[in-house]
Amino acid sequence: MLITSITEQKKDSGRVSVCIDGKFAFGISKADALYHHLKEGEELSREKYDIITDELVYGKAKDKAVKLLSFAPRTEKELAERLSADYSPEICSRVTDMLKKYGYIDDEAYTAAYINDSFKYKGRGSLRIKAELRAKGVSEEIISAAFENASPDEEKMAYELLKKRLKGSTPTDRREMAKHYRYLAGRGFSYEVIDHAFSRLNADFTEEGYDG
């Protein structure tokens, strides 16, 4: 294995990125690089590589992962992406596999909590929530199963948001109505749900005298 480059990391001048045979292998402190006599253009034995990755790099990757999770729960993909700046895919995979084994990463539990919080506290519709979960790397299978167990009343949520937004009035022209449609659509509600919210609000206004 040939060490093809050792470069100082942009975000941490005390660390370097080591590439072996032209590919990123691991990130390591400058002190550890000096201790292990790592130099560009020199061969790295399998024995030394295993010592560095198993005893040094892997341990620090685990520490960083646990620290990241202490700040906020994350999906497997999110954590791997944060680790990838300093560690190879092999190390990232080893760390995430270990954390999944001991329950530190659980995409199913994360998704259930995310859906609940998004509906209950953030007023987001299912379309937006699903898109956000996909961006976080959650599988369609997990997303679908989690939504089957969730039972939000999206029509009521959209109605309450619209009611609060209009403050006792109803849209008087198409331009104004389109603006409120875009607002609710941006929060992730389907047009069917939005139509129902408008219909309910109009019914309140015309039949009972809407007072906000």
Image (cartoon, rainbow, N blue to C red):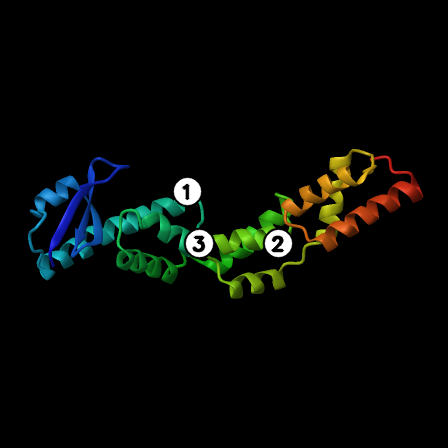
Image quadrant holding the C terminus, namely top right
| Residue 111 position in % (x across, y down) | 52, 56
Q: Which residue position holds label 1?
A: 71
- Distance between mark 2 and mark 3 Cα atoms: 19 Å
- Residue type marked 2: Leu
| Residue 160 position in % (x across, y down) | 75, 43
Closer to us: mark 1 or mark 2? 2
| Residue 115 position in % (x across, y down) | 58, 53
Disc 3: CA contacts within 10 A as few (<14), some (14-19) or many (>=20): many
Q: Answer with left or right where residue 92 lies relative to residue 119.
A: left
Q: Number of callouts in the render?
A: 3
Q: Which residue position holds label 3?
A: 75
Q: Who's the residue at 27% across and 56% down the image? A: 91
Q: Which residue position holds label 2?
A: 127
- Residue type marked 1: Phe
SS at mark 1 in the image: helix
Q: Can the viewer see residue 68?
A: yes
| Residue 97 position in % (x across, y down) | 34, 61
User: In this picture, is 204 found above or below 105?
Assistant: above
Q: Answer with left or right where residue 10 lies relative to residue 199.
A: left
Q: Who's the residue at 83% across and 44% down the image? A: 201
- Nearer to us in this view, 163 or 54: 163
